[in-house]
Every structure is written in C-alpha cells, then in structure tokens.
Image (tube, rainbow, N blue to C red):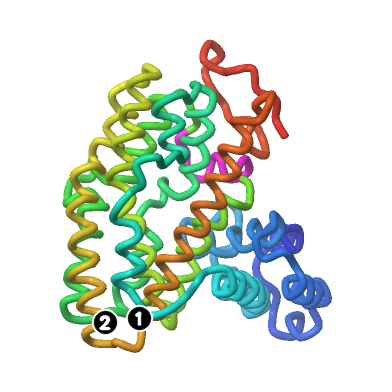
Amino acid sequence: MSRTVARALAAGPPPGPAQHATGHAAGEAVRRARAADPYGEDLQLALHTCYELHYRGFTGVDPDWEWDPALLRLRAAMEEAFLAALRRDVPGGTDVEGALGELLTEPVDASGVTHHLRDEGEWWQLLEHAALRSVYHLKEADPHAWVVPRLRGRAKTALVAVEHDEFGGGRPEMIHQGLYAGLLDDLGLDASYGAHVDAAPAVMLATVNMMSLFGLRRSLRGALVGHFAAAEITTAPSARRMARALERLGAGPRAVLFYTEHIEADAVHEQVLRHDVIGGLLEDEPGLAADVVLGVQATGLLEDRLAAHLLGSWRARPPRSSLRAPVAAPAAAAGPVTGE
C-alpha cells in the first residue's frame, strides 16, 4: 500500500476520471487495506503519507493529489481498518468524567518513557525520543485546528483560545512547532519538517495518524476533542520530567525551553479543555459522549504501545535502537547503538 501511494505521488499530476475507473493498482491496494494489520508498518506509513497531503505536502508532488478520488478511496479503506481496531481495543463507554479522571492521578510507582529518561536514560535514547516526537511536534496543534469549524459557542471559543497559545499567542518566535525545531537543533539533530519520518516505526506514526483521522472527519469531532484533552492532561507532568532529563544529560537551553514552556501552559489548557471545550460540546451535543471517551482511550492505547516499544528496545540486553533508521547526531554524543 505504501509503495502504491509513493509511486502514484511521484508519477506526476493525478490521472483523469477514466483512469480512475480502471486503476488496478489502487483497487488492489484497497483490497490489501481491508486485510492488513491496522497497526502495521505498511498501513500506517501509507496513511501518514496520504494525510501529509493535507498539511505541507511533498516537494515535487502535485498538490491536487490531496483530493484525488482514487487516493481518497484507498485512504478511506485504511482509515476504516484503523478506526475499527481502535474501537475494538479500547473499553469504550460514555463516562467522560471517569475516562478523564483516570488520567488525573498518576500512580506513585509509575515507570514510563519520561521516567526512564529522567532517571537513567542515556544521550542516544534522548536523541531517539526527540527524533520520534518530531513527527508530531513539528506540526504541533495543526491536527486540532481541523475541529474548529465543527464546534460552536463555548466549545469553539475555548478551543481557539488553547490553539492561540499553541501557535505562539501572537508571537511567531514562541510557536510550539518552532520551539521544537529549536530543541532538535540544540540536540544536533535535523530540525527540518518531516526529517525523521523515515526513522519512525508504525507505533509512532499511529499516534499522529489518529489525530489526523479524528480531525479530518466531522463525524469524529468528539473523539478529537477527547484526544486533545487527554494529551493536555498528561503533558504537564511528563514535560516536567523531560526538562529534568534534558538538564541531567547536559542539553542546552533551547531544548529545555520547549518543555518548560509546556509545564505551566498545559496545566491551564487541561482545565479549559475539560470544563469549557468538552463541557460546552456535550452541553450542545450530549450524544457525542461515547466519541469523547473513544478519543481519550485511543490516545492512551497508542501512547502505551509506543512506550512499550521504546522501553522494550532500550532495556533489552544488549540495548537496541527503537528507530527504523539512524538519526543524524553529534559524533561525540552518539552512543554504541545497533539499528534494528
């Protein structure tokens, strides 16, 4: 599927309607999508490539591919497989407060990726984490902007206020995407948009594809809001741990700034999203409660899968890289890592 998408985009402008009707490669890819591993490398890479057409696109790729009917048909088949898996693999329900409440108290014995990096992580592991997270953070808050026209009243006003902060609050130098580029540069990594997508395994791509899926479908506006709230609730404590990890490992001030900026800001955002965005949405559309819960739980599911992959790689004996390909790092800092 990913090969079909890449070859189509590289071949020139989208074909005409007659070619769509007889496109064997696209039809075969749709059949593959329906039988594919919904969390697998092929489907997630193909889906990520399709979604990127709605963001900044690709150099040399005709922008009209964004709305090509055959490509959208394939994307829809992949989305249905992915969405069905998410619905299958989360508990579900309509208890929004209960789903969010589980995120508000962290176990005292918690041991996740940011705990590992804070307490015992090595420099090469910090670089891998930074490269992987760049797949989202270099487009931070963009997927959530899709939901703005799907909301109204209090929910819309509150969500736009949060997005305003994410985009720098009127100060271009403080846009969070730019702050993350500064973090990458400070760590000696390539800070250009999309630079580390090829290194990212499916478990990372899936976390970003979920945001795009929820954001691009009006029917899933509740899920996008649930996801956004879940992300903001968990960001402040994890950002605090990441700031400590960066300081312990000797990273520069621009790297630390990205996370210190999120500690206070996201603590406020969490309150706004819970009370005003979700509260306003469900006041207007109480029937969306199950979708909000889906967004909260799917976020946890995919983040847990990513954490298991990272910690499983780093704590293996001997430790191994969590990436599909090496990332550019300062020669003096690179650890003795073997790629998968």
Q: Residue at x 74, y 59 (%)?
A: 7
Count of labels shown?
2
Residue 224, position in %: x, y? 39, 69
Q: Residue at x 65, y 79 (%)?
A: 73
| Callout 2 amino acid | Leu
Q: Residue at x 62, y 36 (%)?
A: 322
Residue matched to label 1 = 289
Residue 247 falls within the magenta-colored stretch = no
Residue 323, position in %: x, y? 63, 37
Residue 195 falls within the magenta-colored stretch = yes
- Give the mark nearer the N terminus: 1 vs 2: 2
Task: Bin the neighbour count of mark 1 within 10 Å (Cα to Cα): few under 14, some 14-19, many 20 and up.
Answer: many
Range shown magenta: 191-200
Residue 298, position in %: x, y? 48, 65
Horizontal arrangement in the rendering, residue 263 relative to residue 205 (left or right): left
Q: Main secondary structure of the magenta part?
A: loop
Q: In this view, does 24 lie above or below 107?
A: below
The reply to whether discs 1 and 2 touch (Cβ–Cβ < 8 Å) is yes
Name the secondary structure under disc 1: helix
Horizontal arrangement in the rendering, residue 130 relative to residue 331 (left or right): left
Residue 252, position in %: x, y? 33, 21
Task: Bin the neighbour count of mark 2 within 10 Å (Cα to Cα): few under 14, some 14-19, many 20 and up.
Answer: some
In the rendered structure, find residue 229 and report the number of the disc placed on it.
Answer: none
The C terminus appears in which quarter of the rendering?
top right
Viewer-closest of 250 and 66: 250
The N terminus appears in which quarter of the rendering?
bottom right
Q: Distance between the residues labelled 1 and 2?
A: 7 Å
Residue matched to label 2 = 282
| Callout 1 amino acid | Ala
Name the secondary structure under disc 2: helix
Q: Is residue 225 above or below residue 182?
A: below
